[in-house]
Image (tube, helix red, strand yellow):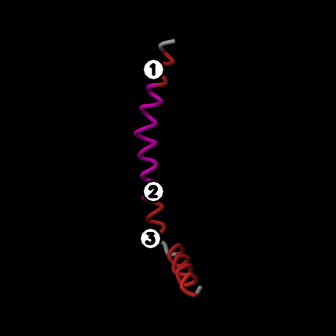
Amino acid sequence: MSNLQMKLEAFIEDVNREDGYTLLLFEKITNLLFFFIKWGGIPLVLYLLFEITRW
């Protein structure tokens, strides 16, 4: 139990730091999701607009 509590305290301390590993991880995940939305979503929207104009 004390091992879990120590890990939880270390996690909380890491989250509270401005340059913590957890925040850097969330930043990488967010940037990756934005990359996929940008390069996957823009061509999809252009394709849908092209298909709508053919009606």
Q: Pointer 2 and pointer 3: residues touching (CB < 8 Å)?
A: no
For marks 1 and 3, give the CA distance.
Answer: 43 Å
Residue 5's x, y, as percent?
58, 83
Residue located beneath label 2 in the image: 29
Q: Residue at x 47, y 13 (%)?
A: 54
Which element carries disc 3, helix, strand or loop? helix
Q: Specify the segment rendered in magenta.
A: 28-47
Q: Which of 52 and 2 is in front in this view?
A: 2
Q: Which residue is drawn at 56% across and 81% down?
A: 4
Residue 16's x, y, as percent?
54, 75
Q: In the image, what residue type sits under mark 3? A: Tyr
Say which label, 1 or 3, has the lower sequence index. Answer: 3
Residue 20's x, y, as percent?
46, 72
Say which label, 2 or 3, has the lower sequence index. Answer: 3
Q: In this view, does 15 lie above or below 53?
A: below
Question: Which of the numbered marks, if any, corresponds to residue 50?
Answer: 1
> To which quarter of the image does residue 42 belong?
top left
Q: In the image, what residue type sits under mark 2? A: Ile
Q: Which residue is drawn at 51% across and 18% down?
A: 52
For marks 2 and 3, give the CA distance.
Answer: 12 Å
Question: Which of the numbered marks, if any, corresponds to residue 14?
Answer: none
For marks 1 and 2, give the CA distance.
Answer: 31 Å
Question: Which of the numbered marks, if any, corresponds to residue 21?
Answer: 3
Q: In the image, what residue type sits under mark 1? A: Phe
Which element carries disc 2, helix, strand or loop? helix
Which element carries disc 1, helix, strand or loop? helix
